[in-house]
Image: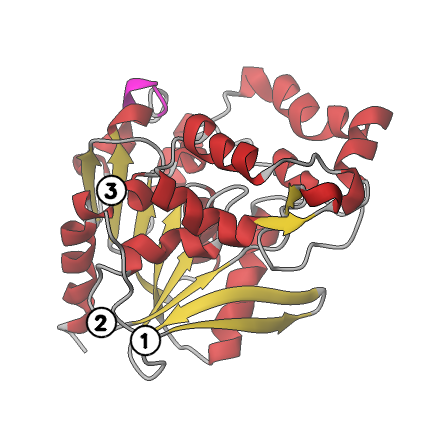
Amino acid sequence: MKSTIKFSETEIRIKVPWGNIAALTWGDHSKPPVLLCHGMMDVCSGFRPLVALLPQVFFYVSIELPGNGKSEQFPKQARYTTADYVPVVLAVKKHFNWDHFIYIGHSLGAVVGKYFDIAYPGVITRIVELDPVPLYNAWAPRNFNHWYHTYYGDYYQEDTHRKYNGPAETAPKYTYEKALDLMMNFRGLTKEGADHVLERSLEPAEDGLFRFTYDQRQKKITLLPLSPEYMKDLYTSVSTPTLTILSSVLIELGAYHDTPFVQDPGAWPNKNYTVKVVTGGHDVHINNPELLVDDVAKFLLEVKAKL
């Protein structure tokens, strides 16, 4: 679908100790802020189709996590973990001098938002989780051995470590057509959605080829080994009003089989949880934002009505 932004788009840089966080903003910065955070190996422009349809009464800031798009990487040899991304959100809050803000996170971005909300309660006024499958990737205690070797033990094997910590020049190279094919046929994006993502995901390499801009260490982002029981107790204890949008494809694949409370608002004792299932895949917010925009807009405007 056509996704022409209704208000001005600005590219910004936010200074942090290891470099800069890149972001796109839309709207008037004096309006209530909405912070958007993408998923694994993604970019901030992926939110453009959704923001184009959302109410203009907010100031939207879509960031790129370190090691993605035009944001600088964490220092070499450092690990990327979900917990290490929480200070990125805090840095954005401090940059804009926000007291409070609304948060929209897709996939890995939903993990980051949930952890921030738990670590800094009362700062996020509302949170929207778009297909937050990594957030509910539970690990039973019997699987701790597998978790360790997946995220730590194997990472430090010589060949693996070299692969993820090598210079950019060693990253795979593609023709633009091949990169587009990967976005459409592997990730499942529409042509328009792929164009939004590729504009910040690719950089020129030699011989007319391109490489993806994401840090290769992004392929080994470490998730915390939370059991289903602990996960339920922790997440349902949060009182922040939450709207969760689940894609039908991920549900059919059994993504929430071990955490059924995700699909059950009655399991949230604070009565702050709403869930909606939409037809589509993991990137439905890019491919078909019209399927969820009414629910998201209504949820955001409930905050505006109280201001």
| Sooner in the amino-acid sequence: mark 2 or mark 3 | 2
**Relative side of 261 to 111, left or right:** left
What is the CA distance from the residue labelled 3 to the residue labelled 1? 22 Å
Q: Residues within 10 Å of mark 2 (few under 14, many from 20)?
A: some
Q: Which residues are magenta?
A: 251-255
Q: Residues within 10 Å of mark 3 (few under 14, many from 20)?
A: many
| Of labels 2 and 3, the one closer to you | 3
Residue 17 horizontal/vertical position (percent): 70, 69
- Circle 1: element type: loop
Q: Is residue 234 above or below residue 9?
A: above
Residue position for label 2: 56
Camera-side residue of 10 and 38? 10
Contact between marks 1 and 2 (CB within 8 A): the answer is yes
The furthest residue to the top: 142
Q: Examine the image and state in which quarter residue 157 appears.
A: top right
Q: Main secondary structure of the magenta part?
A: loop
Camera-side residue of 126 and 297? 297
Camera-side residue of 19 and 259? 19
Q: Answer whether residue 9 is visible to the viewer in this image.
A: yes
In the image, residue 189 lies in the stretch drawn in magenta: no
Residue position for label 1: 27
Residue 52 horizontal/vertical position (percent): 27, 61
- What residue do we see at 64% from left, 51% from top? 203
- What residue do we see at 43% from left, 38% from top? 135
Under mark 1, the amino acid is Gly
**Relative side of 263 to 21, left or right:** left
